Image (spheres, rainbow, N blue to C red):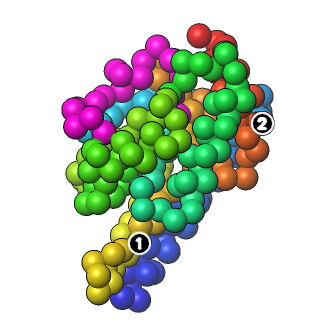
Amino acid sequence: MVKKLRNRAARIALLGAALAVLVGCGGRDYQTKGIENLLPPLRFELTAESGEPITEAAFRGAPAVVFFGFTHCPDVCPTAMARIAAAMEAAGAPASDLRVLFVSVDPGRDDPATLKRYTDFFSDRVTGATADVEALREMTKRYRATFGYGEPNEFGDYSVSHSSAMYLFDAKGEARALFSPDDSVAAMAADLRRVASEG
């Protein structure tokens, strides 16, 4: 158990270091954290909340925000989703085409119906999706994110550790900004408007 906790702590520390590099090297013209040319373009193969396969092609032509979480998350995920919904609203017409991809890193509990109920609560512009753990690890590694599972309790419940950042991609699928929990809704909205206005 102690070894697992140390391994998890090490993964979280590495993630923190990676995000620090992104923040330190990003562009300075964003109100959040610019990450132009620091991450690969948006690419994924997942199963959507509809039960159908979904790839990055479904998001091309408009900006997209990607967030890794899970529906049983008690605080980080609902807070992040409420904040991005508020930022989209505040961004107004320029960002009206923007969509959010909520990627569940808990495929064992987040089936399509569960994902749809969860995403519908926040906005009809949010799409839930997930995949098997191997595919999720490949995707999170691509964007310097991470996740892990705690030991199940006597009822089979378990915790999931995951990154708290949100990734903003432009209409061409290029990474543009990183939203952290410390960023204000106003700052997020400003960067959504900026990227959306570029077409």
Check disc 1 and report its element: helix, strand or loop: loop
Residue hosting label 1: 159
On the image, the x and y values in percent for residue 67 come to 49, 44
- At a point 33% along the width and 80% down the height, the residue shown is 151
- Look at label 2 and name its amino acid: Ala
Residue hosting label 2: 186
On the image, the x and y values in percent for residue 79 come to 61, 54
Q: Residues within 10 Å of mark 1 (few under 14, many from 20)?
A: some
Where the C terminus falls, by quadrant?
Answer: top right
- Look at label 1 and name its amino acid: Ser
- At a point 67% along the width and 53% down the height, the residue shown is 181
Callouts 1 and 2 close, C-beta under 8 Å: no
Give the extent of the magenta segment: 49-65
Taking the magenta stretch, the answer to whether it contains residue 69 is no
Residue 194 to residue 45: above or below: above
Check disc 2 and report its element: helix, strand or loop: helix
